[in-house]
Image (cartoon, grey):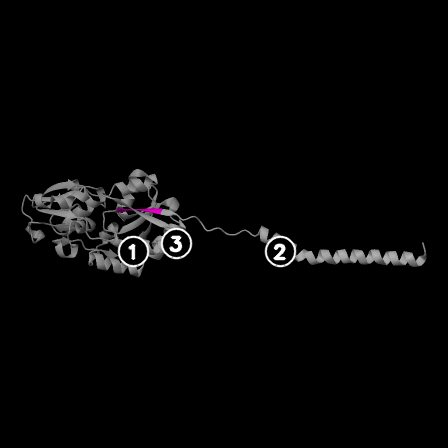
């Protein structure tokens, strides 16, 4: 082979290799983009969740308003689980049948924790609903007759609350060292020889025709058609130091105290100025917001 042909052949091979290399370089960018697209993970939205909220009674307008807004914004659902008495929701929360409750006072939750080792934790104060003395026969609590009958709730915290209200009204005298949880045995003086009839809280209002007076929780009184600030013949003073025990709370199991969905519902949708307006409209000042 001549020297000229050898040089020509070498140049041809060199040009061919350069052309192949140029073709490969041109295809590199699309290949990398495809790899990037395949490796990018699309963040999936969390599945909608249903929170179960335990309440007592049928009047829950403040929660209903808050829930509508929460559901619209979050995509989650909230089921209001209604109970007829004060014992059922705590059992349901302990058993995991509901996720949170909004019905009980601080002292009621603490008593249940103590007796049931439930591990409840309250994440917010809500309202205080003053308990009152009601009567279908009397206009003034001072007119309760000697030997009269008074119905009071039987549940431990409600029972204590009722007796302390009667003490504040001057109808009885409770022992000074009695503590927060008291019973009829802690009455030091009963000058009118009152007979006390203990009933479940949801039944006390039904006894009005059969007794001279009754101590009724505000929510139960309103369900019976009363306006506490107008119809009670004596109403608990919400500013009294002992009344702090009876601020209503939102309770969860301690393991759920930092649950983001629950905290979002409570802090951003319930504990708002809009909710205060609903309470004022629906309860006419008989329920006092504590946030």
- Which residue in the structure is indicated by mark 3? 74
The Cα–Cα distance between marks 3 and 1, rounded to whole angstroms, is 15 Å
- Circle 2 SS class: helix
Disc 3, disc 1: CB below 8 Å?
A: no
Q: Is residue 43 left or right of residue 157?
A: right
User: Which label's residue is closer to the chain start, 3 or 1?
Assistant: 1
Residue 248 colored in magenta in the image: no
- Which residue in the structure is indicated by mark 2? 33
Q: Residues within 10 Å of mark 2 (few under 14, many from 20)?
A: few
The Cα–Cα distance between marks 1 and 2, rounded to whole angstroms, is 49 Å
* Residue 130 percent across, percent down from the top left: 20, 53
* Residue 179 percent across, percent down from the top left: 22, 45
The residue depicted at 83 percent of the width and 55 percent of the height is 13
Tell me if residue 31 can be seen: yes
Camera-nearest residue between 199 and 8:
8
What is the residue that sits farthest to the left in this orientation? Answer: 146
Q: Quadrant of the N terminus?
A: bottom right
Disc 1, disc 2: CB below 8 Å?
A: no
The Cα–Cα distance between marks 3 and 2, rounded to whole angstroms, is 35 Å
Q: Which residues are magenta?
A: 51-55
- Which residue in the structure is indicated by mark 1? 65
Q: Residues within 10 Å of mark 3 (few under 14, many from 20)?
A: few
């Amino acid at each position: 082979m001549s020297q000229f042909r050898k040089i020509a052949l070498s140049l041809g091979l060199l040009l061919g290799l350069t052309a192949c290399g140029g073709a490969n370089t041109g295809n590199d960018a699309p290949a990398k983009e495809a790899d990037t697209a395949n490796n990018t993970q699309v963040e999936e939205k969390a599945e909608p969740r249903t929170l179960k909220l335990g309440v007592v009674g049928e009047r829950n307008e403040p929660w209903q308003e808050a829930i509508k807004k929460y559901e619209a914004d979050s995509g989650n659902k909230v089921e209001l689980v209604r109970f007829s008495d004060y014992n059922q929701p705590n059992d349901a929360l302990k058993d995991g049948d509901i996720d949170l409750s909004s019905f009980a006072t601080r002292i009621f939750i603490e008593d249940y924790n103590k007796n049931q080792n439930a591990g409840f934790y309250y994440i917010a104060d809500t309202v205080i609903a003053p308990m009152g003395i009601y009567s279908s026969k009397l206009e003034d609590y001072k007119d309760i007759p000697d030997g009269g009958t008074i119905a009071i709730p039987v549940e431990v915290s409600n029972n204590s609350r009722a007796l302390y209200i009667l003490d504040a009204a001057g109808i009885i005298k409770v022992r000074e060292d009695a503590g927060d949880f008291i019973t009829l045995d802690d009455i030091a003086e009963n000058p009118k020889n009152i007979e006390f009839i203990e009933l479940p809280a949801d039944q006390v209002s039904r006894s009005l025709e059969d007794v001279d007076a009754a101590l009724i929780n505000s929510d139960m009184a309103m369900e019976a058609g009363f306006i506490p600030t107008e119809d009670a013949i004596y109403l608990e003073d919400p500013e009294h130091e002992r009344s702090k025990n009876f601020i209503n709370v939102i309770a969860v199991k301690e393991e759920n105290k930092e649950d983001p969905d629950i905290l979002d519902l409570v802090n951003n949708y319930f504990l708002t100025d809009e909710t205060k307006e609903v309470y004022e409209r629906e309860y006419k000042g008989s329920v006092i917001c504590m946030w």
